[in-house]
Image (tube, rainbow, N blue to C red):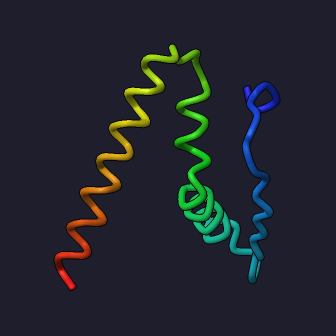
Amino acid sequence: MLNRLTFWRKANIKIEVKNDNLEQALRALKKKLQREGVFRLLKIKSHFEKPSERKKREKDENTRRVKKFKKLKARY
């Protein structure tokens, strides 16, 4: 599945394993991947999305982003 997906940018993520604590390193890796949006991108790209559905999704994302920005701006 990963080999057929194309990413717009390559993320160079490095995680150090300290004191042989692999659990902590995996948690840190998952957090960094989530921040980069890799899981979300995998979910979107795992199946074909019609152009009309893509436009609707992008429009909804943009409206959510604008609302969030306005909310934060009103706070300060």
Establish if 34 lies above or below 3: below
Q: Residue at x 57, y 44 (%)?
A: 39
Q: Is residue 65 left or right of residue 3?
A: left
Q: Nearer the viewer, residue 56 or 36?
A: 56
Q: Residue at x 60, y 36 (%)?
A: 42
> Where is the C terminus found, in terms of image quarters?
bottom left
Residue 14 coordinates in the image, percent (x, y): 78, 69
Q: Is residue 16 left or right of residue 62?
A: right
Establish if 51 lies above or below 34: above
Q: Dividing the picture into quarters, in which one does residue 5 lie? A: top right
Q: Give the mark count.
A: 0
Residue 49 coordinates in the image, percent (x, y): 53, 18
Establish if 49 lies above or below 57: above
Residue 8 coordinates in the image, percent (x, y): 73, 44
Q: Residue at x 75, y 82 (%)?
A: 19
Establish if 8 lies above or below 18: above
Q: Nearer the viewer, residue 14 or 25?
A: 14
Q: Residue at x 56, y 51 (%)?
A: 37
